[in-house]
């Protein structure tokens, strides 16, 4: 990843530019004239800079480089799990309006983020909360429409959910009530990436 693409095993794999802290997409590439197959890393999910004469490509995965290293993950098919879950949201008294949240998943593609969504309601008795995809309607949580719900104060807990992101790794959170000592949290455990398959 830190060297320009070159043909063959143990050679550079970056399509263009210099290594950075961003999402990288892994492509299998092929020359149909010779049948040669190789791998390529690109910051573009759809338009990698292809080496000369390579005319076929297929994205087979994506990963995140952060803090100067690749964020450690485990992969099982389409499921990618961070070896260490990430607390992406820890918001005190978040209010009752919809809030766009950015999660620690790859950008440039749509994935199903695997999250735990929780509200610690230290001051407010009845709260309902929702975490939804931005492509869904902005919906007010209620006693009959919620991901997280409590009817007594100091009853914080969490719910595990799969929620679709946009290509900027964003989702929406919203809750029905909010108090000064209430806290909303979203922990990201990983993501599901269909990698172009239906």
Image: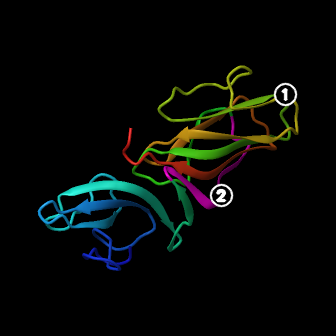
Q: In the visual, does 115 lie left or right of 71?
A: right
93 up-or-down from 103: above or below: above
Q: Earlier in the sequence, mark 1 or mark 2?
A: 2
The location of residue 101, given as percent across then percent down, is: 57, 45
Nearer to me, 96 or 50: 50
Identify the image quadrant of the N terminus. Answer: bottom left
Left or right of 116? Residue 34 is left
Q: Main secondary structure of the magenta part?
A: strand
The residue tagged with tag 2: helix, strand or loop?
Answer: strand
**Magenta segment includes 194:** no
Q: Which residue is mark 1?
A: 151
Instruction: Tell me what residue is drawn at x 15 percent, y 59 percent.
Output: 32
- Is the residue 142 above or below the residue 29 in the image? above
Residues rendered magenta in the picture: 77-95
Front one among 119 and 77? 77
Count neighbours of disc 1 (C-alpha within 10 A) and say few if under 14, some if 14 to 19, many if 20 or more. Answer: few
What colouring does the structure picture have?
rainbow
Residue bearing the label numbered 2: 85
Closer to the camera: disc 1 or disc 2? Answer: 2
Q: CA distance from mark 1 to mark 2?
A: 28 Å
Residue 86 against residue 41 in the figure, above or below: above
Q: Residue furthest top?
A: 144
Name the residue rendered at 48%, 62% in the picture: 64
Q: Position of residue 48 (x, y in %)?
A: 27, 59
């Amino acid at each position: 990843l830190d060297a320009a693409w070159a043909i063959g095993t143990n050679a550079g794999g970056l399509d263009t530019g210099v290594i950075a802290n961003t999402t990288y997409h892994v492509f299998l590439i092929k020359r149909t004239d010779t049948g040669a197959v190789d791998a390529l890393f690109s910051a573009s999910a759809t338009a990698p800079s292809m080496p000369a004469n390579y005319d076929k490509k297929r994205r087979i995965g994506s990963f995140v480089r952060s803090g100067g290293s690749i964020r450690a993950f485990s992969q099982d098919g389409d499921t990618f799990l961070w070896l260490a879950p990430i607390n992406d949201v820890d918001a005190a008294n978040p209010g009752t309006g919809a809030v766009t949240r950015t999660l620690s998943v790859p950008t440039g593609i749509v994935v199903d983020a695997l999250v735990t969504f929780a509200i610690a309601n230290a001051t407010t008795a009845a709260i309902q909360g929702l975490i939804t995809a931005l492509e869904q309607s902005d919906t007010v949580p209620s006693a009959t429409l919620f991901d997280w719900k409590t009817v007594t104060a100091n009853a914080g807990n969490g719910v595990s959910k799969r929620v679709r992101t946009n290509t900027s790794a964003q989702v929406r959170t919203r809750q029905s009530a909010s108090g000064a000592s209430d806290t909303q949290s979203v922990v990201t455990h990983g993501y599901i990436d269909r990698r172009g398959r239906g």
